[in-house]
Image (cartoon, helix red, strand yellow):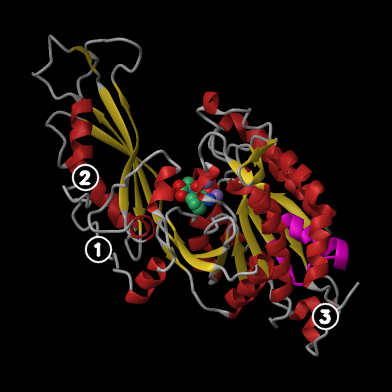
Amino acid sequence: MTTQTSNSPASAALPTTPSILAEVERGLPNSIERLCDFLRIPSVSTDPAHDADTRRCADWLVTELRALGFTAESAKTIGHPMVLAHHPGAGPAAAARPRVLYYGHYDVQPADPVELWKSPPFEPVIVDGPRGKRVVARGAVDDKGQVMGIVEALRAWHTLAGGPPCPVTLMIEGEEESGSKSLEPFMHAARAKLAADVCIVSDTGMWNIETPAITTRLRGLVYMEFTVHGPSRDLHSGMYGGAVANPINTVARILSDLHDADRRITIPGFYDGVAELSPAVKQQWESLGFSDQAFLGDIGLSKGQGEAGRSTLERTWSRPTCDVNGVFGGYTGKGAKTVIGAHATAKVSFRLVSKQDPVKIAAAFEAFVRARLPEGCTVEFESHGTNPAIEVSESSRFLAAANRGLATVFAKAPLLIGCGGSIPAVGSIQRILGMDSLLIGFGLDDDCVHSPNEKFELECYRNAIRSHAAILGELALLSR
Ligand code: BES
Ligand code: MN
Ligand code: MN
């Protein structure tokens, strides 16, 4: 084992970064095999038909982590199991170094529409793409490939040094894609076991395949479903049409009222707590050189649409939105059926930013719908989750260490970016453990996250492993 030349006792007997990266390289074919094994388990958390698969997936991870010297368990929760694992770090010096907590999720989105997949979603395949080989399967990038980026980095440390250089805890959840209902109760109960100095979350994206990024803001989410009930049964639309309120017409009307002509949201109080970007952040984002053309071209569009007077990056990273995610009711089969359906449902989600209060927004949305309900109709609401937007510190000694690790791997410094998506755990970690997370992700915009043919570039997988391995080495040079 080669050792670092440094007078700092913290670096005593640490393998050098080049030797760790060489070990990652040597193990890469096996790392790809193991990712494929992980991807073969259909851990769809939202579908009870997959509960046994989800449990099996947690057990699979536990077995992998135990082989790396971790004490690991598939912990029971009110929902799907939580994978919790701990390693005190190799050697006596580890105790003086920062304690690292990793978060990721082993559950995946449903694969539907299955007929649009070019290969079965849970039979991973390695195929050629314009940027080299890629693995295609549900969960490839969100989040199994990224979780394995961490696990395989820990493997390289295990092989070279007998374990990670710092005390390491992993919390890998099984319900991120279905609302994280048991996460907070679990975290409260396991607080002592989760104690750490820094948290690393790998569930976001890079700037592009050559350029790493650290995400410092995530949008929040309010997800509501409502059903309007009208007549007591489906009606002949000739006999009754024009004489009674049609629930689908009513839902359509309510949904179209949600935006004004500038595509701002019209719910009273909705923009309370939304902050304008500071000139410095605005300028930093402008300097990123974001290409609307590339972003939209990839999804077959030539022009974007959103809140008037805002750039695409502002619209997705710093402005709140409202999108209808599904609408149903009436006759949806083939051909015509002249009918007024008795019920209609819409699924509506709001992405939140800054200090917007999710609970207030959910209540304001409910009032907005009720105020537009025709006499005699009733409405039912169901919440699929509320979580606030998150911002994490853009300067800390841990972030500086991560910067150094990423710069070694990519030969360029990471960019600080925002993210339009949500990861509820990051807020829970802030609130319950009092800690900011470093959001270091390796996805690309064209990875088809949540879509058919989800993929992860093998180059991104390799760099994820390399980066986590190098960042651990940098963190080990800090004192606790
Ligand atoms: N990994 C994503 C978040 C994400 C999305 C990061 C896009 C980067 C780009 C995460 O698994 C996710 O899908 N989150 C959900 C949250 C929800 C289910 C509470 C989301 O954003 O819709
Ligand atoms: Mn994810
Ligand atoms: Mn997801």
For disc 3, the marked residue is 4
- Foreground pick, 100 / 204: 204
If the image is split into quadrants, where does the N terminus sit? bottom right
Query: Sequence-wise, which precedes: disc 1 or disc 3?
Result: 3
Residue depth check, mark 3 versus mark 2: number of the one nearer the observer = 3
Q: Is residue 204 visible?
A: yes
Residue 164 lies in the magenta-colored region = yes
Q: CA distance from mark 1 to mark 3?
A: 52 Å
Q: Where is 282 relative to 114, above or below?
A: below
* Residue at (28% x, 19% y) in the render: 330
Checking the image for residue 258, the label placed there is 2
The three-letter amino acid code for the residue at tag 3 is Gln
* Residue at (18% x, 42% y) in the render: 257
SS for dot 1 = loop
Checking the image for residue 272, the label placed there is 1
Quadrant housing residue 103: bottom right
Q: Could you tell whether 15 is left or right of 199 in the image?
A: right
Give how far across and how far down residue 117 sits, in percent: 56, 28
The three-letter amino acid code for the residue at tag 2 is Leu
Q: Which residues are magenta?
A: 151-169
The three-letter amino acid code for the residue at tag 1 is Asp
Quadrant housing residue 161: bottom right
* Residue at (55% x, 71% y) in the render: 435
Q: CA distance from mark 2 to mark 1?
A: 16 Å
Q: Where is 55 relative to 279, above or below?
A: above
